[in-house]
Image: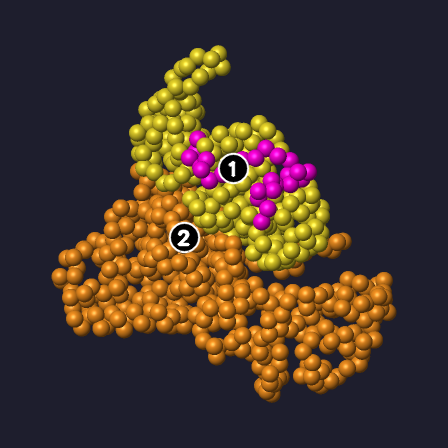
Amino acid sequence: MSFLKPKTYIEQGDIVILYLSVNSMHAIEAVPTIVNKKGETISHIFQTPYGSLKVESIIGVEYGSRVELSKGWAHVLQPNPEMWTQTLPHRTQIIYTPDISMILHQLEVRPGAVVVESGTGSGSLSHYFLRALKPTGRLHTFDFHEARADQAREEFRRHGLGDFVTVYHRDVCNLGFSSELDGAADAVFLDLPAPDLAVPHAFKALKLSGGRFCSFSPCIEQSQRCIAQLTKLGFNEICSMEVLQQESVIKTRSLPVIDLEFLKAPKSAEIIANEDNKTKEPKELKKYLTSSNPQVLPGHTGFLTFATLPPNIPKS
Amino acid sequence: MGSIPNIQLGDYIVIQRQKYTKLQKFGSLDATATLGKEHLELKSLLDQPYGSTFKMCVKESKAGKRGAQRQHTLELCSENELRSIRDILNISSSGADNRDISDNGEAQALKSEDIEQMREACNESSKIIEKLVENSKTFHTRTEYSQDKYLLKKEKKYFEFVQIRQPSIRLMADIFHRQDAEKVMGIRVDTLSQIISYSSVSGFGSYLLYESGTNGLLPAAMLNSIGADTQATLVHMHPGNVPQKQALLALKLPLEQQQRCISVNLYSVLREFYQGDKAETRSDATTAQTEAETAAVTASEENDASTEEQSDIIEPNTKKLKLDESLNSNNKSAPLRWQLENKRAAALMNAKFDSLVMAAKEHPSNILQALLPLVKPSRPVVIFSTCKELLHETYMELKTTGKVTNLHVTSNWLRTYQILPNRTHPEVNMSGNSGYLLTGYTLK
């Protein structure tokens, strides 16, 4: 239930983020026992590079607390869509926070909104949609892969989000969104290999008072075909963009200062004498707070194409 | 969501002419809006549905310093009148390349006076463009792409339709950033969207925002994400006497939602929080008010641009409130509105917050020190700044104290693309500064 609203204490069944370091975060379920591969019920022990955690021990603990591991410690955090995106079990390629934030902003999702999404995939984006539209809106999410749809449905239920979402197993390119959704959506989001095939269905699903559309495609050709369809159906404000996030690596560096001035004058007798007596003085060091970009960073995620369906466009 | 509301007096409206958009208050029936040299009388917008398109009809034209200033009335029109200029003109022939076109200034046979006259005489951009094309010696030898570009350029100049739209965070973020990015502290759309994500602001919880002047965009964006008919609340701290609220007012949110945004002066609310009633017994209301004012002055000294903005934006609402306040202060008994707001905010501060967002013109460090203890553990902290050096220092401070973990400083690239058949490429210009975000999670 840990995704519904901010909470203070870890309850049994919560998903908890075990935070070891920036590069090491794990989503674990706060249950005292699990069933192993042999079908036996065993005590839930989570292994980390800093030793093991008896998961039962964190139930009732306040979120944000430090917990002891057998060879170190970690923090327990309440998950939110950002952390979930970084720790979720990947069933497909997923979209990350910078693109997702732009999608939510451009689709104008807020509490009360009705959003149609295809495909569900690993549910990374769905969690963000749900946070933004609950408690008064609704997400209708579609995937053509039955097991993925089932897994997502179960996940949303366990995360306390089941009341705000309907998960459909359906091939929307061929079958469209279900007819109950005709004229029901404030926004439609597509992440499909051939978004152009689903654009007419998106057109049908959007409200007569108009709405917003987004398609995410890794390749520009998909966007081109999608835009051709959108233009044909009377969408306007068509706009394509790419958002790339850069991390700054911040470090305090100590740099040696080199003095070259003394080379201009011949060595005086005094200096020569000093050199003989003393061992070398340590070089002067200056401290700087520096930032640099990492050696490798994401150079491309996908093209985001947005469009508006203006109000009162006849749908038949 | 669903039915389309009508344009009312007192509304803020977005006027769109092709790609240009502008936020305007429709304060009275005499209100006019200015789009370049065109002045539009807004009277006829009343009670028409948002999203409607209006035709600009020339009423009179006065000679101004820089060409004619035209006064227009607006006439509701149907979408059918908006057709592709290429279809209207029925253009048939085009050239293969530009080898025979030279820039000798003789391509257009019409003189600029002729064109001005034509503009006075007829309303329709298509007619003007038709004449321009007829009298252009080179138009038909241009390539199809080049013709398109020519038509777009001319259409932009003579386009006689405007659309009236309801303000939304998306439209306003775009308008503010395009018109004067400084006025929203340089918060670009991608950064704004990420502030909303990283802060986890939603329909549940209690949120804390400190901002020193974004025309109300940040509190409006957060309150928009909090939503109507939800439980969440926002305490909005600002350094001035009066919060900048333009974007908040423009959203025209239901009253219950507006009331869940508690705008308070940073100094006076912290005094209330730490000293409570003690502060009031020691100093009566008037001195507290002066205190807030001096605070406002110090804040504005640091950035004198913000004072001008503020005086622009003091909407009649607050003026009225101020009058009420001065009336109230005469009969000492009733607490002033800002005092009540301070009390409400202090109660929420005691209960602690579910996230902290800061966009400060001041150095974030001291403000953060004051506000961080008000945030519950395992909650997001998001700090915006246009320059990364300030965030570097803050990053190191937070890292040293160990009170906030998962620290990241990020910035963004945002590229928009022209996607047209055989003409796809990134837009020629891009914005180079997204600003920087420092994000992390509080620990116990």
Q: Which mark is residue A144?
A: none
Q: Can you say which quadrant of the picture contains the C terminus of chain B?
A: top left
Task: Find numbered disc 1 in the image and state the secondary structure of the residue it sits on.
Answer: strand
Q: For mark 2, what is the residue?
A: B228
Q: Position of residue A111 (x, y in %)?
A: 45, 48
Q: Amino acid at mark 1?
A: Thr
Taking the spot 32% from the left edge, 40% from the top edge, the residue there is B377
Taking the spot 33% from the left edge, 66% from the top edge, the residue there is B242
Q: Position of residue B422 (x, y in %)?
A: 76, 53
- Start-end of magenta stretch: A158-183
Q: Chain of mark 1?
A: A
Q: Colour of chain A?
A: yellow
Task: Find numbered disc 2 in the image and state the secondary structure of the residue it sits on.
Answer: loop
A299 part of magenta stretch:
no
Q: CA distance from mark 2 to mark 1?
A: 22 Å
Q: Is residue B100 above or below residue B418?
A: below
For label 2, count other residues whose C-alpha is less than 10 Å away and answer few (under 14), some (14-19) or many (20+): many
Q: Which chain is orange?
A: B
Q: Position of residue A110 (x, y in %)?
A: 47, 50
Q: Is residue B4 left or right of residue B19?
A: left
Q: Position of residue A201 (x, y in %)?
A: 64, 45
Q: For mark 1, what is the residue?
A: A166
Q: Is residue A152 above or below residue B432?
A: above
Taking the spot 47% from the left edge, 72% from the top edge, the residue there is B26
Taking the spot 67% from the left edge, 47% from the top edge, the residue there is A200
Pick whichever, B363 or B13, lies toward us. Answer: B13
- Is there any visible trace of residue A130 in the rendered image? yes
Q: Amino acid at mark 2?
A: Ala
Pick whichever, B35 or A172, lies toward us. Answer: A172
Q: Chain of mark 2?
A: B
Q: Is residue B10 left or right of residue A176?
A: left
Q: Is residue A165 left or right of residue B68?
A: left
